[in-house]
Amino acid sequence: MYESSSIELSLKALRNNIRFLHRLMGKDVKISSVVKGNAYGHGIAPFVKIASKCGINHFSVFSADEALEIKNTLHDNATIMIMGLVEQESLQWAIANDIEFFVFEKKRLQEAIKVSRKISKPAKIHIELETGMNRTGFSAKELPAIIKFLKTKKQNIHLKGLCTHYAGAENIANYQRVKNQVEAFQQLKQMFIKENIEPEQLHTACSAASIMFPETRMDMVRIGIMQYGLWSSPETFMHYLNSQRNKKDPLKRVIAWKSHVMSVKQVSAGDFIGYGSVFTAHEKMKVAVIPVGYAQGFSRSLGNHGRVLIHEKLCPVVGTVNMNMMVVDVSEIPQVQKGDEAVMIGNQNGQQVTVASFSEFSNQLNYELLTRLPPNIPRKIIS
Ligand SMILES: *Cc1c(COP(=O)(O)O)cnc(C)c1O
């Protein structure tokens, strides 16, 4: 073993989550698995491999480099959709390889047509509509010209879909804003229908929208966080539970993150532990050093707050989290020794450290914590 920690992906948990999502969304709704941000830290290549085993054949990414990683892993066995950045250099690659992409600027549309002519292959695009998030998307004002343009370029443009994204569906505070967006999408869609343009797929929902606003599911849902076994927010989870008789969490966490005890030592009462005077031992203590720090994605803000599972006990971090190490209190574990398993995220015989517990202690969103897990931590698939 060379690495200081490793990440395990549970095929069984993913299978459970995908099954649940299919059942919830209904059989006519396609699931696009969102794997931007290195598959929310799970690792694109290992994750799409197991997702593919679970029957997923549609993936959404942010940029062309992520699309390439999927292509290299699954070859032509999946549809890949880029929701964000496709630069000039990658546009030809994308079109030649049947990669679909969002279009939200006239310029990209014109460039796509140019490339399509050059390689004699239509570009498969999704027109993104501005419904109120004010990030990317065509506004109502721009659409008539775009629609007219599309009608004359049918050989070069294959209009796969119409889409939009909601500005915070996971938060009740945004309820009216999202409702207005749902309405705006319907109106903008009508502009296409009136001109006899019928896109194959309408898709607007992320995880939270698919739960909080079922009418947003349409033909396809773009599911990120839920497939990994986590909820977008506590409100989203509560909203789901309130609609159910069985009050059990249907999702299972796919990821586990583990290391081991690097060294154990005794500390006398009154001594400081680690850098500075952040932690004083009030009594004789036993501490263990874990070779994981903020360089490995364990946030520095978890100093004196975070917890690690060793011998089925939650051991608090004492002092600051260093770049490559942290110190945890193991006074309650007489048998602890070098080499023992230490779990940052995951289970040990029924005891667990959840991803949500990190959010509580470090003010990080579960999204942020996961995507910050460095890509060089080895990922292992557990069946
Ligand atoms: C990230 C993203 C999603 C998925 O969001 P989750 O909350 O993880 O389900 C869907 N659509 C777009 C456009 C996104 O950027």
Image: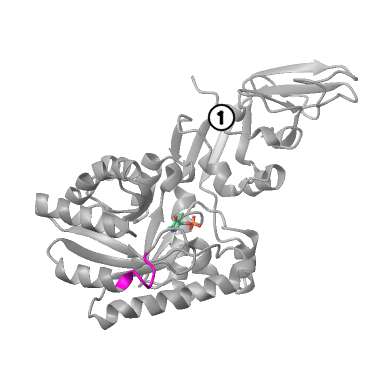
Vertical arrangement, residue 286 with respect to residue 345, above or below: above
Which of the 4 image quarters holds residue 219? bottom left
Is residue 139 part of the magenta span, yes or no?
A: yes
Which of the 4 image quarters holds residue 241? bottom right
In the current view of this chain or complex, which residue is farthest to the bottom? 194
Estimate the x, y position of residue 50 in percent, counting from the top left: 38, 47
Is residue 210 part of the magenta span, yes or no?
A: no
Magenta-drawn segment: 138-143
Give the amino acid at mark 1: Gln
Colour scheme of this structure image?
one colour
**Which corner quadrant holds the C terminus?**
top left
Estimate the x, y position of residue 49 in percent, counting from the top left: 35, 45
Tell whether 157 sits left or right of 349: left
Q: Badge 1 is on which residue?
A: 296
Magenta segment, prevailing SS (helix, strand or loop): loop
Q: Nearer the viewer, residue 205 or 25?
A: 205
Estimate the x, y position of residue 249 in percent, counting from the top left: 60, 60
Vertical arrangement, residue 345 with respect to residue 83, above or below: above
Q: Nearer the viewer, residue 8 or 150?
A: 150
Q: Nearer the viewer, residue 177 or 200?
A: 177
